[in-house]
């Protein structure tokens, strides 16, 4: 039993590429770029992790520890170097109900189980199913998350200590907006002067110096919460190990695991498009799962890939594992030793960075593309965008894939038709040359193709340009054959491809158990046995 399980794991886990530099050259300039990029990401992670901890209803350090541990582990063994992971809002909104009803210890247990499920998904190579996500859904995903990131920054324009009840007003609001605009201008202009320092880091640094030097009265990181803390300590979730606990945490673990993998794999594809490099989906699933298991045992809230921070990293030049590792370690330093300094950074600087991320993330060309693609694809893009903003990413992606699949099925269902002619080999017989796939969506159209009452005694259905796909197709063939049989007429099938032949043989429909020629060098006719599935 144990050997069989280990053999299964060995067959399903391929050796990952854990090279620190991947295929980048190891130079001083490259290392400097990676470290500075990691520092920029770490600075942007602080308010995000604290805000998401508030959303989930847990202590800020629970969010910060998650950002550190998940960021570090996925940077070390993840499938896409350059991608940043941490505590995310998409997961936090699901966690809040669990924490409110059962407490934070059940959250830690849920995060551990979530990680186990994600590792299983990676071992089973389920990450490959992300290929089924159509491009319009990807556009909607990108645009929706850009809007979500934008809306999340608006909370920084509220008075600290009011619980988000009061907005900034008057001179304080004007100053905040001015500093945001200044940060954005620096990020926009810095690459035109020099690329030695990442533009987002320069924007944060210059704006912070101005605020601190002149003592400007604007919200700072410390106004959100203190980020001071020690090293994360090992902690076994204090929950009863019984069936009742599993009933509580399992549904949340499944939802969180699915959302985390969907967001991570879509971000992996997006970062791959930007950097021009492929990522390992299964490896990323295992990395995310491992990170969440560890995080659950060290008092973290769990997480997944973060598109905003990943965009900051790639735009700052981060391409290797060094940037992600550096971001996590810098974040730990902030928590343990540099919290007084980091708490002085103005939120306006970080908001400016995220606004530039929004501008860079949103697929502005989608407005032009939607006028040139099929109307259904344009609709799917808008639908996924709206559902991402109104609900969450996982629901949006699932809805987009389902709508795209239904649209595809409908379009294929409309393609089925038949060309009729007299048989050359069998005198007096009629041939129906079926065009288009025969599946659940096209069965009604298939049945309507036949003029059963007026057809001759022998009817041949030629599938050279068609495919028999599913059980509904088998049912439709049997129904047509039964109608001909009731009138004393014979229905024969011709030019079945090997997969169609196998499907019909397994169902027991073929009267002749013979191999067909997939190249159609020899036409073999098959009579149809009725009464197998029942013609209802």
Image (cartoon, rainbow, N blue to C red):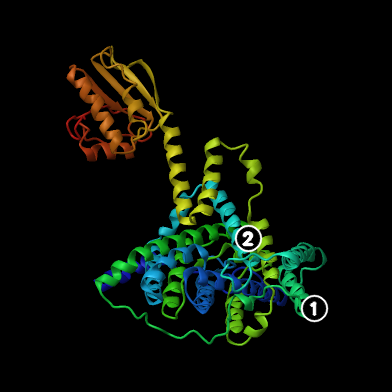
Residue 531 screen position, x and y as percent? 17, 31
Dot 1, how many residues are within 10 Å of its Cα: few (below 14), some (14-19), or many (20+)? few
For the residues bearing labels 2 and 1, Cβ distance under 8 angstroms: no
- For disc 1, the marked residue is 214
Residue 320 screen position, x and y as percent? 61, 70
- Front position among marks 2 and 1: 1
Could you tell whether 183 is left or right of 138 in the image?
Answer: right
Quadrant of the drawing holding the N terminus = bottom left
- Is residue 26 visible in the rendered image? The answer is no
Give the answer, above or below, for where 228 lies relative to 399: below
Quadrant of the drawing holding the C terminus = top left
Give the answer, above or below, for where 256 lies relative to 293: above
Residue 475 screen position, x and y as percent? 26, 33
The image quarter containing residue 282 is bottom left
Q: Disc 2 on helix, strand or loop?
A: helix
Could you tell whether 468 is left or right of 93 in the image?
Answer: left
The disc, 2 or 1, on the residue closer to the chain's N-terminal end is: 1
Q: Disc 1 on helix, strand or loop?
A: helix
Distance of mark 2 from mark 1, alpha carbons?
A: 40 Å
Q: Residue at x 55, y 49 (%)?
A: 140
Give the answer, above or below, for where 376 lies relative to 99: above
Labelled disc at residue 396: none
- For disc 2, the marked residue is 275
Name the one closer to the observer, 251 or 159. 159
């Amino acid at each position: 039993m144990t050997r069989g399980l280990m053999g299964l794991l060995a067959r399903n886990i391929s050796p990952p590429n854990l090279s620190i530099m991947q295929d980048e050259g190891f130079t001083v300039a490259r290392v400097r770029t990676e470290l500075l990029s990691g520092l920029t990401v770490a600075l942007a992670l602080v308010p995000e992790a604290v805000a998401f901890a508030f959303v989930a209803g847990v202590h800020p350090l629970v969010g910060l520890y998650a950002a550190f541990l998940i960021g570090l582990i996925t940077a070390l063994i993840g499938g896409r170097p350059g991608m940043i992971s941490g505590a995310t809002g998409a997961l936090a909104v699901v966690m809040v109900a669990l924490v409110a009803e059962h407490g934070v210890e059940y959250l830690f247990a849920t995060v551990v189980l979530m990680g186990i499920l994600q590792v299983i998904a990676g071992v089973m190579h389920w990450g490959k199913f992300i290929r089924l996500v159509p491009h319009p859904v990807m556009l909607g995903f990108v645009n929706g998350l850009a809007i979500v990131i934008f809306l999340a920054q608006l909370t920084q324009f509220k008075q600290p200590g009011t619980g988000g009840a009061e907005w900034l007003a008057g001179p304080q609001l004007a100053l905040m907006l001015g500093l945001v605009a200044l940060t954005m201008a620096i990020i926009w202009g810095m690459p035109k002067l020099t690329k030695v320092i990442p533009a987002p880091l320069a924007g944060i640094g210059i704006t912070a110096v101005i605020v601190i030097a002149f003592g400007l009265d604007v919200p700072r990181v410390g106004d959100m919460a203190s980020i001071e803390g020690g090293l994360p300590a090992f902690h076994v979730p204090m929950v009863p190990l019984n069936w009742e606990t599993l009933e509580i945490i399992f549904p949340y673990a499944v939802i969180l695991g699915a959302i985390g993998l969907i967001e991570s794999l879509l971000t992996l594809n997006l970062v791959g498009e930007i950097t021009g490099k492929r990522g390992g989906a299964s490896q990323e699933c295992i990395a995310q799962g491992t990170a969440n298991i560890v995080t659950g045992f060290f008092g973290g809230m769990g997480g997944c890939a973060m598109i905003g921070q990943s965009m900051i990293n790639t735009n700052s030049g981060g391409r290797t594992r060094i940037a992600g590792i550096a971001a996590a370690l810098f974040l730990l330093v902030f928590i343990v030793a540099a919290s007084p300094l980091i708490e002085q950074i103005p939120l306006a600087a970080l908001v400016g960075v995220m606004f530039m991320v929004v501008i860079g993330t949103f697929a502005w060309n989608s407005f032009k593309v939607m006028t040139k693609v099929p109307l259904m694809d344009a609709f799917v893009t808008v639908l996924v965008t709206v559902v991402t903003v109104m609900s969450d990413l996982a629901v949006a992606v699932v809805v987009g894939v389902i709508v795209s699949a239904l649209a595809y099925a409908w379009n294929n269902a409309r393609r089925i038709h038949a060309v009729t002619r007299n048989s050359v080999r069998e005198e007096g017989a009629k041939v129906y040359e079926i065009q288009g796939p025969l599946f659940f969506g096209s069965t009604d159209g298939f049945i309507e193709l036949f003029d059963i009452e007026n057809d001759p005694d022998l009817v041949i259905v030629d599938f050279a340009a068609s495919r028999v796909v599913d059980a509904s197709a088998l049912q439709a063939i049997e129904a047509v054959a039964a109608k001909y049989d009731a009138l004393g007429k014979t229905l024969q099938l011709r030019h079945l491809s090997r997969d169609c032949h196998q499907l019909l043989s397994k169902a027991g429909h073929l009267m002749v158990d013979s191999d067909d020629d997939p190249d159609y060098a020899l036409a073999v006719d098959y009579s149809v046995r009725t009464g197998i599935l029942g013609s209802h």
